[in-house]
Amino acid sequence: MEVNVILFIIGCIITFIGALCDLIGSLGLLRFPNFFVRIHAATVGTLGGAVYPLFGIALMTLACDFLGIARYLMAGGALVTALIIALTAPAGAHALARGSHRARIPVYPKVCDHLEEDYFIKKVYRG
């Protein structure tokens, strides 16, 4: 087999894995019990459902000879976009989770909260 065919097949497989991550993330958003766990599902959907397909698209465009020099521009754009999403999505999810925890969003069912004692200590010392 040619290298281009192998790259195209690997790109299709990675894109399919990204579609599965989107499906799993959307099911998690529907089925998980509270906001904090749903943030995890949304992050899985964002990272797996956006970054993997972008890597797959980059491999598929590199395999397409008929695109000429434009294939390198498309693959580069897909890789840069995947890198930006991979760097910013976890930070955004963390900011949402921290803001909702500080706003005292209730968590049902009750779980072990290691930050609760930190909140209590800050409240006692600050008055």
Image (cartoon, helix red, strand yellow):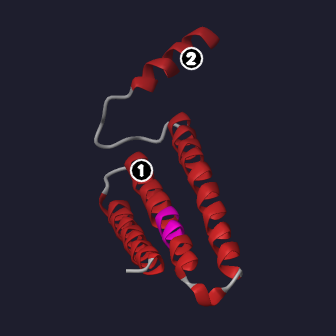
x and y, in percent, of residue 66 in the image: 61, 90
Left or right, residue 125 beside residue 30: right
Q: Secondary structure at mark 2?
A: helix
Secondary structure of the magenta portion, mostly?
Answer: helix
- Outermost residue, bottom side: 66
Observer-nearest of 13 and 124: 13
In the displayed structure, 32 sits above or below 91; it is below
Q: Does 90 sit left or right of 35 as displayed?
A: right
Question: Can you say which quadrant of the picture contains the C terminus?
Answer: top right
| Residue type, mark 1 in image | His
Residue under label 2: 123
> Given the image, on which type of amino acid does mark 2 rest?
Lys
> Label for residue 40?
1
- Asked if 39 appears above or below 122 in the picture, the reply is below
Going from the N terminus, do you reach mark 2 or mark 1 first? 1
Count of numbered tags: 2
